[in-house]
Image (spheres, rainbow, N blue to C red):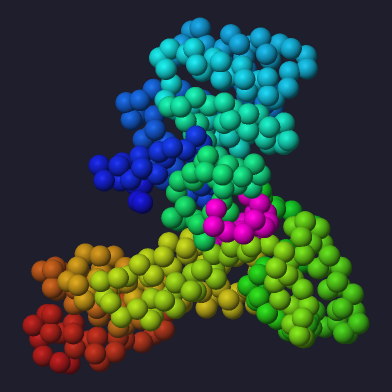
Amino acid sequence: MQLQTLTALTQQSLADQIENHRLILFAPQMRNRNTLMAWFINTGLEAYFYSLTEQDSTLGTLLASLVEALQDIDPQFGRQLTQALAQPRANPADLAEALLADLARARPRPRYLILDNLDHLVQNATTDLFFEQLLAGLPRGLQVVINSRLLPYSPWAAFVRSGQAVVLGTQHVIDGGIFDPSAPEKPHLEVYGFEGGRVFVNGMPRDTWDGPLPRNLFYYFVDHPMVTRDDIFATFWPELTTKEATNVFHVTKRKISERLGYELTAYSGGFYRPSGQMIVHYDVANFERAVQEGRETQAPASPEAWYQAIRLYRSQFLHGIDMPWIAQRREELRLTYTEALIGVGRLHKSLGDTERALSYYLRALREVPHREDIHRDVMALYEARGERGKALAQYELLAAMLKRTLNITPSKATRTLYNMLRGEGES
């Protein structure tokens, strides 16, 4: 479901998705979350909304702030919860029961309790128990909506698997995200190579690596799911003896395991392979699968594989990290991304959709400005749209760029098209 604009159709689809679920979660990596949040607030149903701040790091501070905020809607709200918070040994179950009592007495009666920016709350066993008790006692007709850019696997996955919760926005999350109820109950590793190298274990970020070497070897393992020790040593320690490289390798590999909390690889049959301890979600692998599917798809009216590849390519591979293998891989993936742009551009061209075809071709030219065949396609599309001036300007742009960067002129095929558009013979 595209959430950029919620049409009547998508509104009904959204309503169907959330029906009969006590808890509604926004997928942490989803886009357009603000549009989705606006839908809940502006449905015409009563929405009790609170956006957490940095001060709401504990359950007690969150609930105290919630009472204060919701009194703008119902000045009488929060009597039970305030009393419970005043108790020196208030436990999570008591706090949940008090909040439920206040919600039951609230006027107007809330349809949604929306907690925005929940990532400010430090989640632990206390908060887990609180939400378990809250959902267990939630009255029919009231749903809790949570928006957070970080959601740990526990306790949320258990709610999804039990049918109490639904996750929205998984269409643009790699592999449907870590809360897919059909996935095995195993730890999840998410790696976003196209987003500067972001890493999450069970929904929580791994930002520190005890130096660049463990970080870079980690990415190498993820990007090379089956690799020999010799390949690793040649990539990272070509100047060391085998004994020296072996010592450094095992120390570095141990640091990776310490950061993740799990073994990433296992040695078998002469190769280092994924250990199987975690479900690995890797955007680059999904990108390459989508491109391959796009290459194999024969139906021009079905460019979904190309679209998926283009969506996944958020930025250059591991931008800001420099190693020879990363630079080589970065260039390979950039050219593959260009292929996807050209592929979907050609599909739209075959369907007569010149506007979209031009859009994708021009994006491709930002990556490969020397591709004269694409410049010629752009010129032809402009001519087909009756925009001859733009077609001629495209040629001038190409000619100036080739002169400046390579000191050459456009090819005969490109000059022939240019002269034809000018109404001249071949030169």
Q: Quadrant of residue 66?
A: top right
Q: Quadrant of residue 223?
A: bottom right
* Picture residue at 13% right of the left edge, 73% below the top: 384
Q: Is residue 83 left or right of residue 117?
A: right
Q: Find residue 141 and report its horizontal and vertical position in percent.
A: 43, 27
* Picture residue at 58% right of the left edge, 54% below the top: 178
The stretch drawn in magenta includes residue 348: no
Of 205 and 321, which appears nearest the observer? 205
* Picture residue at 84% right of the left edge, 65% below the top: 254
Q: Is residue 207 above or below residue 91?
A: below
Q: Is residue 360 left or right of residue 393?
A: right
Q: Find residue 61 and report its horizontal and vertical position in percent.
A: 66, 22
Of 237 and 175, which appears nearest the observer? 175
Q: Find residue 216 and report its horizontal and vertical position in percent.
A: 71, 67
Q: Is residue 6 above or below residue 332?
A: above
In the image, the segment drawn in magenta is 181-203
- Which image quarter holds the C terminus? bottom left
Q: Is residue 411 left or right of residue 46?
A: left
